[in-house]
Structures are given as structure tokens and as C-alpha cells.
Amino acid sequence: MTLAKAYKDVTFTLVAGESYIDPDTGEVAFKGDSIEAEIVNEDNDNPECYLVDVEYYLRLYRSRESMHVITRSNFGSVKLNTKGIETDIENEVVLFTGSDSTTSDKFIKGNFIYTPIGIVYTISGTEYGSGISGVTSSNTIKADEKIVGIYEVSYLSKYDRYKFSSPRLGRMIILFIGQKGLERI
């Protein structure tokens, strides 16, 4: 049995994005707006530091559940643990700044509700009386016209849980590359 050693120099960098063919150049490109990874302290019993040779969890949010995900790291291990975990995102504050759309922190899968915080105005200065809506399988929130105002939103999101561990000190880079279903590059 090997005991884990505590080091403050074990750090992680998460890189997530989707590869696609750029229609203008025909080259493979990379964008980060359809996949997101994060380490949530509560999922890992709130560690004060990360230990060598101990498994931890991270969350991977995808805009499309059919997205194929390639996982790589510079060292250590990263493995899918559980797919499709539902989570309620509550009381997130979003801001419209003269546009008819804004973005939420996570991808919206359903149960979108909102409450305006104060008065919301159209860009012509009149009070906005219509609502907003969350676009399913994206992080886009739409209004019927260009507005200025603040909303508190709640919605259902889903993520996949991955286990990861580092066998040594240093910066472990974890890379997630999303690709569209059968249209893999």
C-alpha cells in the first residue's frame, strides 16, 4: 500500500473545446463554447490541496449529448466515471447589455425559469414587458428584442463525471476535445 503524499505543487489545467472544419479555410479549428470542464471542490470533499496518486473528480458539461469526446493528459490518468448526471443550477445572475441574447454559465437542458431583478428596459428606453427563454442544449438566453437589465435564472443542466489523478508533482494538463457524433474529424 502506498500512502499519498501532500504537495501544494500538484495543479491542474483544464482545456476543453470542440474541433470542427472552418468553412472559410477548410482547416481544422478549435472553439470552446460547446464543452466546458471544471473541478468542483464539493465533489472532492473540499481538499486543502491535491495529493499525488489520489483520485479526484471533475465535471464535463457538453452542449450536445451525442458529442464524441476525446480525453488526453500530459501525464496521469483521466477516465469517464458517470455519464449524464443532472444538476439544478439555481439563482444564477445574467445581464443583458443592449442585446437580444446573453449566456448562462452552464448548458441548459430544461426547467428554465427567470425573475427580473429590478426594471428591465428596451434599448429605446421603454419598460420591457416580455420574458426571456433558455435555448435547450446551449448556454444562450434569448429575449424578444434588444434589452438592458438583470435576471436571476435557474435551470437543469447535465454533466459527465471523470476521475483523474496525478502520479507526480507539477502541472497536469487535462484536454477534452469534442467532436460531432458521426462527423468526426
Image (tube, rainbow, N blue to C red):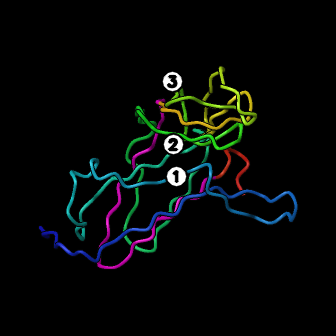
Q: Say whether disc 1 or disc 2 marks the residue closer to the N-terminus.
A: 1
* Left or right: residue 157 compared with residue 138: left
Which kind of residue does numbered mark 2 sit on? Lys
Q: Where is residue 103 in the image (x, y as percent from the top left)?
A: 60, 43
Say if the magenta span includes residue 62.
no
Return the disc, 3 or 1, that comes first in the chain's sequence: 1
Callout 3 secondary element: strand
Which mark is on residue 106?
Answer: 2
Please tell me whether residue 132 is drawn above or below residue 183 in the rendered image: above
Q: Name the foreground residue: 154 vs 119.
A: 119
Q: Quadrant of residue 78?
A: bottom left
The residue under the point 47% across, 36% down is 158
Residue 55 point in image, percent of width and height: 27, 59
Identify the residue position indicated by label 1 in the image. Answer: 36
Q: Which of marks 3 and 2 is nearer the N terminus?
A: 2
User: How far is disc 1 from disc 2 in space, using C-alphas?
Assistant: 8 Å
Q: Give the range drawn in magenta.
A: 154-178
